[in-house]
């Protein structure tokens, strides 16, 4: 019998090993975990923080009769990575491309609103508002939507008004022609973090808000003839009698006065007679003094007489000048010294009256067959009303320069009548006739941003009339005839935004063609220039 082997004992389970104590660094950082230094170097997880669209609007947006637009918006186009806008350009091809800057009239409230996007980090987004230095300090607002009150310089008008007398009439008045806006800075910002796969972000947007003053101004000029002067001279012979006559009449529309002087001198072989008549008048009446001195056949005579009337020349004199300046319907005329403007117009008149000496010089060069000359000048007579200010353009987010002009103004009017002797083609001849010129502006013009350009102007050329002829004779067989082409050149220009009135007037070249015709059927023609082109006057009136 075979003996079975003894059964083996079951193997003992291996004793469980006790894990070693966790290793730690000297700073106590557990093993198999990032150290504190590494943790600081890892990028911080930023929550999504961005927006898709940003809108600006004012209290007049989407209001009937105010502004048609709902808002001025900017949004992110993810596909192209571009910032888009709904800006409305002008339908007027004469207007330049409009600005992105939001423009309002003082006072107003600007609404800034962000929308869309993945959300925001705590305390975001932010809106930083920086007003002009004189209107406050910068402030930071938090959140996606805000309303910000904006305004213009509160004391701007009074500050400029206090400088009027120091600066003078013209510079002082120009201070109020479209003052610049107060510009506010708006900066809207977020982190710009977006979840994948959105790669483009809006981040932030800086924008300007321009605030304009609400004032509407108006100036009015109602001017009689500032000073009208008529002057005439003549001398020559009538048979055996020599004569020398002169007269001057000055009408001052501003002061409502008239002053005329007439002198006559006649001499012959045994007679001398001098007569002087002077007349002075105002709105109450006229006094005339007539003085005569004479010698007839060796005997002297003299007289001195006075005469009065209730109304000079039976006419009512022109009323005094009128200048008005209003702001929002309130009269501030007394703040201006209009005398400076009146003196300026007087200076213009003197330049125009320089024609007298010019034509006299021509006459002195000619044979003294006889000579007469008279000139009439009228400067700045009529009326003008100009209204201006800022207004919001209803079709978009901008402000335009508003103006309205009503004018019927004779800037300058001149008439010269001449007659003097000269020698043409060996024949004694006389030049006679008149040259007239007038710069007159008449009409109404009002700003319309849909039609007119940003720098609208009115330009009017002078109205020219008159003709100078030549006549004469050489014995009974030759006749001299001719014509001198002459007149006035120039223009009156009104710029409307801002207002400016400029004018210039020149005496054109006096060029003539003269023909001597004979009864024997032959003729000779000659051309000559009696005078060159002569500048008379070029000024910026206002």
Image: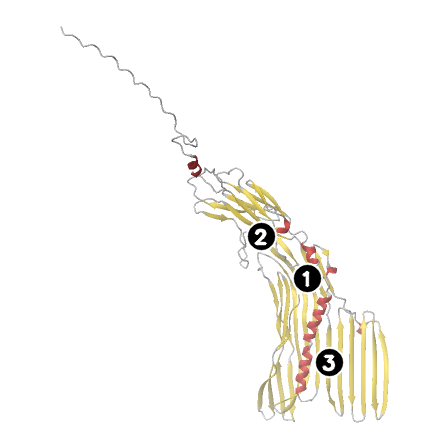
Residue under label 2, please give it: 398
Contact, CB < 8 Å: mark 3 with mark 1?
no
User: Which comes before the other along the chain, label 2 or label 1?
Assistant: 1
Q: Position of residue 198 (x, y in %)?
A: 43, 41
- Residue that appears at 33% across and 21% down: 17
10 Å neighbourhood of mark 3: few (<14), some, or many (≥20)?
A: some
- Work out whether 512 lies above or below 47: below
Residue under label 1, please give it: 172
Q: Position of residue 214 (x, y in %)?
A: 65, 52
Cα distance, mark 3 to mark 2? 59 Å
Dot 3 lies on which element?
Answer: strand
User: Which comes before the other along the chain, label 3 or label 1?
Assistant: 1
Q: Residue furthest left?
A: 1
Residue under label 3, please give it: 232
Contact, CB < 8 Å: mark 2 with mark 1?
no
- Work out whether 297 lies above or below 88: below
User: Which comes before the other along the chain, label 3 or label 2?
Assistant: 3
Tell me how the rendering is colored.
secondary structure
Q: Position of residue 257 (x, y in %)?
A: 78, 71
Dot 2 lies on which element?
Answer: loop
């Amino acid at each position: 019998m075979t003996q079975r082997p003894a059964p083996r004992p079951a193997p003992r389970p291996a004793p469980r090993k006790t894990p070693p104590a966790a290793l730690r660094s000297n700073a106590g950082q557990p093993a198999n975990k990032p150290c504190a230094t590494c943790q600081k170097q890892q990028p911080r997880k930023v929550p999504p923080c961005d927006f898709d669209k940003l809108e600006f609007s004012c209290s007049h947006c989407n209001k009937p009769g105010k502004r048609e637009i709902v808002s001025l918006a900017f949004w992110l186009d993810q596909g192209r990575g571009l910032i888009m806008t709904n800006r409305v350009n002008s339908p007027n091809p004469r207007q330049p491309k409009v600005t992105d800057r939001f423009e309002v009239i003082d006072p107003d409230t600007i609404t800034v609103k962000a929308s869309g996007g993945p959300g925001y980090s705590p305390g975001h987004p932010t809106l930083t508002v920086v007003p002009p230095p004189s209107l406050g300090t910068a402030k930071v607002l938090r959140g996606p939507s805000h309303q910000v009150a904006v305004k213009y310089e509160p004391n701007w008008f009074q500050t400029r008004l206090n400088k009027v007398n120091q600066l003078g009439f013209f510079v002082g008045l120009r201070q109020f022609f479209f003052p610049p806006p107060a510009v506010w800075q708006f900066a809207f910002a977020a982190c710009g973090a977006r979840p994948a796969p959105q790669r483009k972000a809006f981040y932030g947007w800086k924008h300007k808000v321009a605030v304009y003053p609400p004032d509407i101004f108006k100036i009015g000029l109602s001017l009689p003839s500032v000073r009208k002067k008529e002057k005439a001279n003549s001398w020559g012979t009538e048979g055996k009698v020599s004569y020398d006559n002169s007269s001057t009449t000055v009408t001052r529309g501003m002061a409502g006065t008239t002053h005329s002087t007439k002198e006559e001198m006649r001499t012959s072989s045994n007679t001398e007679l001098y007569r002087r008549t002077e007349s002075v008048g105002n709105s109450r009446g006229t006094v005339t003094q007539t003085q005569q001195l004479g010698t007839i056949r060796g005997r002297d005579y003299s007289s001195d007489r006075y005469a009065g009337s209730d109304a000079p020349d039976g006419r009512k004199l022109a009323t005094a000048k009128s200048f008005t300046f209003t702001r929002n319907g309130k009269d501030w005329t007394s703040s201006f010294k209009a005398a400076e403007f009146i003196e300026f117009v007087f200076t213009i008149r003197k330049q125009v009256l320089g024609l007298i000496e010019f034509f006299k010089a021509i006459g002195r060069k000619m044979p003294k067959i006889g000579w007469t000359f008279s000139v009439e000048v009228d400067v700045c007579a009529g009326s003008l009303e100009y209204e201006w200010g800022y207004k919001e353009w209803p079709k978009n987010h901008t402000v335009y320069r508003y103006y309205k002009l009503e004018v019927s103004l004779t800037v300058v009017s001149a008439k010269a009548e001449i007659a003097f002797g000269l020698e043409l083609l060996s024949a004694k001849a006389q030049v006679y006739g008149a040259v007239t010129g007038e710069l007159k502006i008449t009409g109404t013009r009002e700003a319309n941003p849909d039609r007119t350009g940003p720098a609208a102007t009115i330009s009017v050329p002078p109205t020219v009339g008159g003709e100078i002829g030549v006549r004469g004779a050489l014995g009974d067989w030759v006749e001299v005839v001719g014509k001198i082409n002459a007149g006035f050149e120039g223009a009156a220009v009104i710029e409307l935004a801002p207002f400016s009135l400029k004018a210039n007037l020149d005496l054109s070249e006096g060029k003539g063609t003269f023909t001597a015709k004979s009864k024997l059927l032959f003729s000779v023609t000659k051309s000559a220039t009696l005078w060159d082109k002569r500048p008379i006057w070029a000024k910026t009136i206002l």
